[in-house]
Amino acid sequence: ALSSANAKGLMQIIDPTAKDLGINNVWNPRDNIMGGTKYLSQLLRQYDGDMKLALAGYNAGPGKVEKFNGIPPYKETQNYITRVMGYFNNFKENLYAAK
């Protein structure tokens, strides 16, 4: 997958982030997923486990989270957070229901 913002692969990683993460081949599914999860993990630590801020950083970039001192006022980022948190909550509910 290639976005209009030049984000690549399953985890939609842009080239500068891929370089920072040491991803050799952003088109390799394993490298892409491992790099994307590493990046999300870094963001979760940076934002003290705040999933919404980490997702905002993943989508809009940590610089935008800092600039706006929280979730940026971008509809795309806000929709992204809502969608991912919905998936997460649904997964969590189904996981507990299965026990």
Image (cartoon, grey):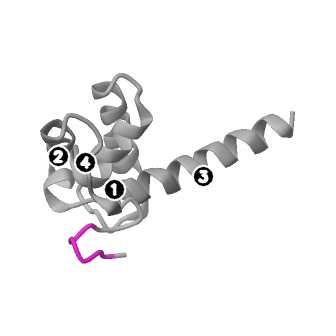
Q: Secondary structure at mark 2?
A: helix
Q: Amino acid at mark 2?
A: Lys
Per the image, the residue denoted by label 4 is 72
Q: Secondary structure at mark 1?
A: helix
- Residue 63's spot in the image, x, y percent? 14, 43
Q: Residues within 10 Å of mark 3 (few under 14, many from 20)?
A: few
* Front-lying residue, 67 or 57: 67
**Mark 1 vs 4: CB contact within 8 A:** yes
Q: Is residue 89 left or right of residue 6?
A: right
**Mark 1 vs 2: CB contact within 8 A:** yes
Quarter the N terminus occupies: bottom left
Q: Amino acid at mark 1?
A: Thr
Q: Which range of residues does the magenta coloring cover?
A: 2-7
Q: Residues within 10 Å of mark 4 (few under 14, many from 20)?
A: many
Quarter the C terminus occupies: top right
Q: CA distance from mark 3 to mark 1?
A: 15 Å
- Residue 95's spot in the image, x, y percent? 76, 39
Per the image, the residue denoted by label 2 is 64
Residue at 40%, 29% (x, y): give it: 50
Per the image, the residue denoted by label 3 is 87
**Mark 3 vs 2: CB contact within 8 A:** no
Q: Amino acid at mark 4?
A: Pro
- Residue 79's spot in the image, x, y percent? 42, 59
Residue at 13%, 55% (x, y): give it: 16
Q: Secondary structure at mark 3?
A: helix
Q: Amino acid at mark 3?
A: Tyr
Is residue 84 located in the magenta-colored stretch of the structure? no
Q: Is residue 89 left or right of residue 54?
A: right
